[in-house]
Amino acid sequence: MEIDPLFAGMNASTTGMTAQRKRMNAIAENLANAETTRTATGEPYRRKQAVFNEKIDFDSALISAVNNKLQRTDTYHIPGQDQESARMRMAGVEANIVEDQSDFQLVYDPEHPDADEDGVVRMPNVDIVKEMTELIAASRAFEANVTAFNATKGMMKKALEL
């Protein structure tokens, strides 16, 4: 019996926790820079957000690529493995941090040092209420991954008692 499948649930939970931690770090950075009107680039701070993608281990990606290639070249080819077994080897989730390209907020404040000739200041595209809502959601998702991890650990422990 292979041991790797036993830890697949734990691996999925740990990648979920890692992804949510990256998300919470991005939110914390957004909150810290919600009033930053000038960065090193000379522009206001741009909100960062986490984009989640499925993470597939290298072997599964290679098998899937080979199977897809065989299926495209000849309709009578039989793939080396079926697609379902390749999907079973997903390695969880990963988070990539990207900048939100939405427009900056415009605020009229002629006395601000970064105001233009019309007295308008370009403020970061960070909405504090939205960030706090995202933080709560990320925190709950992290907790759900911890609960799933502990449930998997408990099931493995019970299986060893048998």
Image: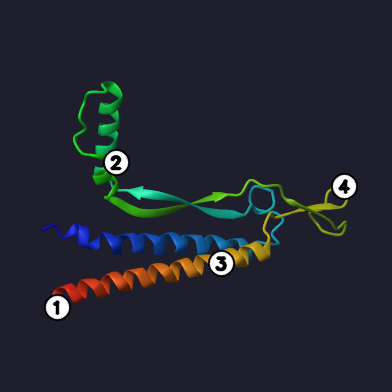
Q: Which is more foreground, mark 4 or mark 3?
A: 3
Quickly name the residue at label 1: 161
User: How far apart are labels 2 and 3 at the CA level?
Assistant: 32 Å
Label 3 crowd bin: few (<14), some (14–19), many (20+), radius 10 Å? some
Amino acid type at mark 4: Glu
- Secondary structure of residue under mark 2: helix
The x and y percentages for residue 101 are 63, 45
Q: In this view, does 32 lie to the left or right of 80?
A: right
Q: Which of marks 4 and 3 is nearer the N terminus?
A: 4
Amino acid type at mark 3: Leu
Please, what secondary structure does the residue beneath circle 1 have?
Answer: helix
Query: Toward the viewer: 71 or 58?
Result: 71
Q: Residue at x 35, y 63 (%)?
A: 13
Tag 4 secondary structure: loop
Distance (Cα) linking label 4 and label 3:
37 Å
Which of the pair 156/132 is nearer the observer? Answer: 156
Please report whichever mark, 2 or 4, sits nearer to the chain's N-terminal start.
2
Is 86 on the left-hand or right-hand side of 101? left
Can you tell which of label 2 and label 4 is closer to the viewer?
A: 2
> Is residue 10 found left or right of 116 in the rendered image?
left
Q: What amino acid is at disc 1?
A: Glu
Residue for badge 4: 117
Residue ID for mark 3: 135
Give the residue number, with chain letter if any, for mark 2.
61
Q: In this view, does 37 lie above or below 136?
A: above
Q: Mark 2 touching mark 4, by CB under 8 A?
A: no
Picture residue at 20% right of the left edge, 76% below the top = 158
